[in-house]
Image (spheres, rainbow, N blue to C red):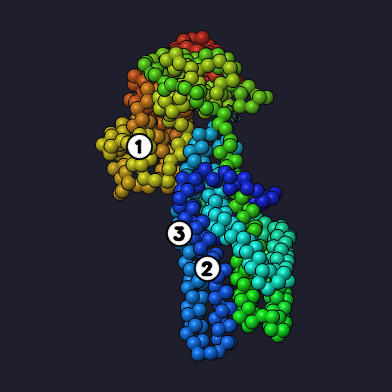
Amino acid sequence: MRSSHSASHEATGFSWRAIRMIWPYLAQYRARIALALGCLVLAKLGSIWAPFLLKHAVDTMGAGGAAWLKAALGLVAAYGAARFANVMFGEIRDTLFGRVTERAMRRVGLRVFEHLHGLDLDFHLERRTGGLARDIERGTNGISFLMRFFVFNIAPTLFEILVVAGLLAWNYGIAYAAITLVAVLAYIAFSIVATEWRTTYVRAANLADSASNTLAVDSLLNYETVKYFGNEAHEAARYDAELGRWEEARRKNRLTLFALNAGQALIVALAMTASMALAARDVSRAQMSVGDFVLINAFMMQLFMPLNFLGMVYREIKGSLAAIEEMFGLLAVRPRVADRPGARPLAVSGARVEFRNVAFRYQAEREILRGVNLRIEPGTKLAVVGASGSGKSTLVKLLFRFYDVSAGAILIDGQDIREVTQQSLRAAIGIVPQDTVLFNDTLLENIRFGRPGASDADVQQAVRMAHLADFVAQLPLGLATRVGERGLKLSGGERQRVAIARTILKRPPILVFDEATSSLDSKAERLILEALAEIAHGHTSLVIAHRLSTVVDADCIAVLDDGRVIEQGRHEELLAAGGAYAALWRNQQT
Ligand SMILES: Nc1ncnc2c1ncn2[C@@H]1O[C@H](COP(=O)(O)OP(=O)(O)O)[C@@H](O)[C@H]1O
Ligand SMILES: [Mg+2]
């Protein structure tokens, strides 16, 4: 599959903002930057000096005389040295500066990564994660590109052009400088206009590129479905149709590139011809030596060579600037949930959890929870039951403080969770969610994620407590087995038990089970309930359940209906009351 890294973002205009944004990340290496700039100057001195040496060599050879060969050879050697110095100092500059760029890329990348983990759940629900990863990659690559091409290539070249034009005007008259400057300006103007004109075609080609890529990825991800329906030929035809669009877009892209390159070449040829013709005339009038003629030719070649890439570089620089600004734009997003200044860590004693008059809405228009009052005494188990969509999982998200309550408060051992650090709050709660997603890594590492420093022996013990030991014993690679993308090589029940083992390792005082068994068959459910009963013993736990049979032993059962607690009590009490719970219970007995 082809990758489509070429920037599809276009900035509205050139700006120094991106460079200002990057500067703090570069500033760490001031000395290196100064050295690199020094090398840049030396390299340019070499390249400006070389044509003069060439001129003197040519003139010496023309003059004849006794010692001419020796002198000419000396000049040629100096010429070679100047050219070598030009390239060498350029390489040293790149080597010195590479480190600066890479460190900046690393620091910016890490900063954005940390920042993204600090943002709220809503931000991530609204963005495609793949897109975020691409934003970071594009942004950091943009930094590298901007440094390499703009700071060390285009800007110095423009400077060199001014110096050379000055030298030409001083030595040979204003006409040479004028031709050079006009040609360079025409060249730049043409490149920019033509590049802007090409933008639509380039973008169409990039779009076609990512469309065909997306289709291929999506189709291969749905490999099983394609096979179930025997639709390979259909998929191939769809892919080929996309590839056809891609081919067509590339064709237009190539033709416009041809126009750009041909126009640039024409401008260069015209400028070269004009200045050489002028020089030939001056030589014929003996106002100029043959060496001067050679010098002017050398300068022209030298000036236009780096400009050859200008069209590409111009577009890429614009793309880089846009990508960098986009990446820094991510840093500007403020999390909706943040620690209070001076927030203290949560101090857990018995782990009493209390929802006090909690109201919550995701969006202003729709109330999800309305005045919920719940209390879980230390070491007891509260079950919350209710129809799908009644707000049960929302309670859990609020407890983890993925969102802040709209009204009321959630307290743990008397401390409002908004007053304590998020880190300490989340460290105190363990969860077994309805659907566990695993990292594409080994079983061992997935379980150890519960407490990254845990020893192998601790992991083994958690495996036993989570009733995973028999399963692991069957695996040829045991805990070293890789679980596949999102853990899909494991069955649902096995994934749930991995989640339980993780939580056991974490050893939190508060446990939450959010419909942890609802997608499992009864055998898997029994295994998991046994494991849960063991680890929940003596812990404060909140159990959200669909099947009521799993919560009959709870110390308290709350029935949630449309964001309201409509009944609360022990199993027998609720049955005796003959309300909503009793009706649900009767329903599930059939
Ligand atoms: N991030 C969200 N943004 C908007 N609405 C949401 C979001 N998450 C859940 N909801 C809505 O909130 C309601 C309660 O959801 P949830 O707490 O998951 O229900 P339950 O777990 O009881 O099935 C649902 O109607 C759902 O559509
Ligand atoms: Mg739910």
The answer to whether 16 is drawn above or below residue 391 in the figure is below
The residue depicted at 53 percent of the width and 34 percent of the height is 119
Nearer the N terminus, badge 3 or badge 1? 3
Q: In which quarter of the image is ligand 1?
A: top right
- Image coordinates of residue 552 in percent, x first then y, are 42, 18
> x, y percentage for residue 70?
47, 85
Which residue is disc 2 drawn over?
46
Between disc 2 and disc 3, the foreground one is 2
Residue 124 appearing in the image? yes
Percent across and percent down for residue 438 are: 43, 41
Helix, strand or loop under label 1: loop
Q: Is residue 307 visible?
A: no
The residue that mark 1 highlights is 452
Q: In this view, does 396 lie above or below 5?
A: above
Question: Who comes first in sequence, dot 1 or dot 2?
Answer: 2
Q: Kindly identify the residue that appears in the image at 62 percent across and 64 percent down.
A: 163
Q: Under 8 Å from ligand 1: the CB of mark 2?
A: no
**Mark earlier in primary sequence (2, 3):** 2
- Residue at image position (39%, 46%) is 441
523 vs 45, nearest the viewer: 45
Q: Count every numbered label the image shows and give the total.
A: 3
